[in-house]
Image (tube, helix red, strand yellow):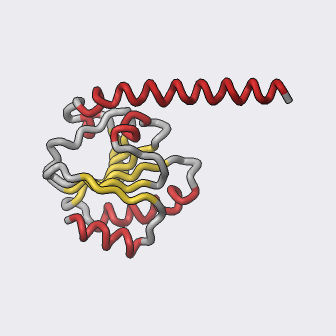
Amino acid sequence: MKKINVFLAGVALVAGLGLASCAGKSADSQNNAGAVAETAVAEGSVITLTEDALDTKDAEQLMIIDFNATWCGPCQKFAPIFKAAAEKYAGKVKFISVDIEACPEVAAQYGVSSIPQITYVKPDGTVDSHVGLMSAEEFDAAINAHL
């Protein structure tokens, strides 16, 4: 029993150090101009972020960021809804998928504490977020409210 407690304490310590190091780096990721084009893979109408940097300050259109993880059931359930919306609003809205484990600094930059989190970034810099699973109808209504 004592070995398990020591192991769990070690895991907690390592996790805490990892979170602290990500928080200190978020300013660097905010200053990475053009990061979406250079560090992303386009999958149809959805851009999947592949490196831990995202710059939204010069956005010319609404950007919708889906913060998710492969192990998250609600995230996986929302993925086809996100993709369908990306196809529907192609050319009007930029859709970006961010795996929080692959890009923890971007998640920290946008204050992600629960997933799925959908973050709306308007060209004027206004940021709004929704946490939790949405139906296709709810997501469509949210998109239209932010356009």
Image quadrant assignment for residue 95: bottom left
Which residue does the image show at 46% across and 55% down from the upper left?
Answer: 116
Q: Position of residue 142 (x, y in %)?
A: 31, 68
At which x and y percent is residue 57?
Answer: 18, 42
Residue sitting nearer the eye, 13 or 84? 13
Above or below: residue 87 compared with residue 66: below
**Count of marks overlaid on the render:** 0
Q: Where is residue 39? Give x, y as percent.
A: 32, 35
- Answer above or below: position of 128 versus 89: above
Q: The N terminus appears in which quarter of the rendering?
A: top right
Query: From this viewpoint, which residue is outermost toward the right?
Result: 1
Instruction: Give the residue drawn at x 52%, y 24%.
Output: 17
Please state if 7 lies on the left or on the right of 66 as rendered.
right
Q: Quadrant of residue 40?
A: top left
Is residue 45 visible from the viewing direction of this image?
no
Q: Residue at x 54, y 47 (%)?
A: 70
Image point (43%, 35%), residue name? 104
Position above or below: 61 against 136 = above
Tell whether 125 sits left or right of 80: left
Q: Is residue 122 visible?
A: yes
| Residue 48 percent across, percent down from the top left | 37, 45
Is residue 102 left or right of 71 when viewed as pictured?
A: left
Query: In the current view of this chain or complex, which residue is farthest to the bottom?
Result: 137
Based on the displayed image, in which of its 4 quarters is residue 145 positioned?
bottom left
Quarter of the figure with the C terminus: bottom left
